[in-house]
Image (cartoon, helix red, strand yellow):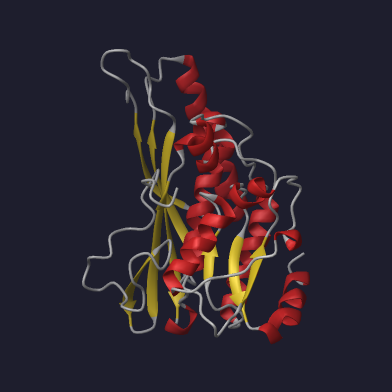
């Protein structure tokens, strides 16, 4: 599954000469670019047509949330988003319904979380030339964030300096449209992860504030591919292994593979120092 090509581009190209040198390709889900001495822009581009095909509302809202989590994970405060909405023939009632649900989701979530949309594009009539079968609903979302101070920049690279790994958020039994189902069953089916706006807002604020006070070492969004994929990204970036106790993960899943591969929203993997766990719990209580 690690070798499978991504369903969307996560982060923009790091070929530009002013990309901040602290990050290397693969060490985060967003690109970081210096715009002045102690000011940086983070950018992430995300999409998930598999989720959007099964549930266009929660799929589209989830794409925005994931892009936000990616820029937060590098230490940025999300400041704006823009969209590129790709659909089939709007004269088809099914296609138009998915488009309408997508617009509602983007409007509802961005209004709730106070993220302005500063631009966008709609592309219709994306379909097979012979069969006229439409593509899956494919909203692609770009989120930009602002980092104030290089000391706030984070990557997903784990190290022995912060040896304790903590999962922020709860894992639910919702694997519809997941990479796991696609690989194991070759099917795009099941219950799609539902985005709880309030849980997402709290999780994002907890991680943003934790970075500002220096609580977290490495930070990584937990979404596509599930917990195991996010953990592998961190281990591969840091060239170090990890031991995880699945019994301590907050979840309603009954199977271990569901825990590992669920793509529930509102989750981050963070690393802390062992002595900081009590501080983290107090920090969490303030965000309940």
The percent coordinates of residue 222 (x first, y second) are: 56, 57
Q: In this view, does 187 lie above or below 287?
A: above
The percent coordinates of residue 64 (x first, y second) are: 50, 49
Q: Nearer the viewer, residue 123 or 266?
A: 266
Q: What residue is rendered at 25% in x and 74% in y?
A: 18
The image shows a total of numbered marks equal to 0
The part of the image, by quadrant, that contains residue 90 is: top left
Q: Nearer the viewer, residue 89 or 69?
A: 69
Q: Which of 118 and 61 is in front in this view?
A: 61
Taking the image as shown, residue 79 lies to the left or right of residue 123, namely: right
On the rendered image, what quadrant is the C terminus found in?
bottom right
Taking the image as shown, residue 287 lies to the left or right of residue 77, namely: right
Q: Is residue 43 above or below residue 182?
A: below
Q: What residue is rendered at 65% in x and 40% in y?
A: 174
Q: Is residue 156 above or below residue 224?
A: below
The percent coordinates of residue 249 (x first, y second) are: 72, 59
The answer to whether any part of residue 168 appears in the image is yes
The part of the image, by quadrant, that contains residue 62 is: top right
Q: What residue is rendered at 59% in x and 36% in y?
A: 176
Taking the image as shown, residue 286 lies to the left or right of residue 180, namely: right
The answer to whether any part of residue 103 appears in the image is no
The percent coordinates of residue 134 (x first, y second) are: 38, 21
Q: What residue is rendered at 59% in x and 62% in y?
A: 268
Q: Nearer the viewer, residue 201 or 112?
A: 201
């Amino acid at each position: 599954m690690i070798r499978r090509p991504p369903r969307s581009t996560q982060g923009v190209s790091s070929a530009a000469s002013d990309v901040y040198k602290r990050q290397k390709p693969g060490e985060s889900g967003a690109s970081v670019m210096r715009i002045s001495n102690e000011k940086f822009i983070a950018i992430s581009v995300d999409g998930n047509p598999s989720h959007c095909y099964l549930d266009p509302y929660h799929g589209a809202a989830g794409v925005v949330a994931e892009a936000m989590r990616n820029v937060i994970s590098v230490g940025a405060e999300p400041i704006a988003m823009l969209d590129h909405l790709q659909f089939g023939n709007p004269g088809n009632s099914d296609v138009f319904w998915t488009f309408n649900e997508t617009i509602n989701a983007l409007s509802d979530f961005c209004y709730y979380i106070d993220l302005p949309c500063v631009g966008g594009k709609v592309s219709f009539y994306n379909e097979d030339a012979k069969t006229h079968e439409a593509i899956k609903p494919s909203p692609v979302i770009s989120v930009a964030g602002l980092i104030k101070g290089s000391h706030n920049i984070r990557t997903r690279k784990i190290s022995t300096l912060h040896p304790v790994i903590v999962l922020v958020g709860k894992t639910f039994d919702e694997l519809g449209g997941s990479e796991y189902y696609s690989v194991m069953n070759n099917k795009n089916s099941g219950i799609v992860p539902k985005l709880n706006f309030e849980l997402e807002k709290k999780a994002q604020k907890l991680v943003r504030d934790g970075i500002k006070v220096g609580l977290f070492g490495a930070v990584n969004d937990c979404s596509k591919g599930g917990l195991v994929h996010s953990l592998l990204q961190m281990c591969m970036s840091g060239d170090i292994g990890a031991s995880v106790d699945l019994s301590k993960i907050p979840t309603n899943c009954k199977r271990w593979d569901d825990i590992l591969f669920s793509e529930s929203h509102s989750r981050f993997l963070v690393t802390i120092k062992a002595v900081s766990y009590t501080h983290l719990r107090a920090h969490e209580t303030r965000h309940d």
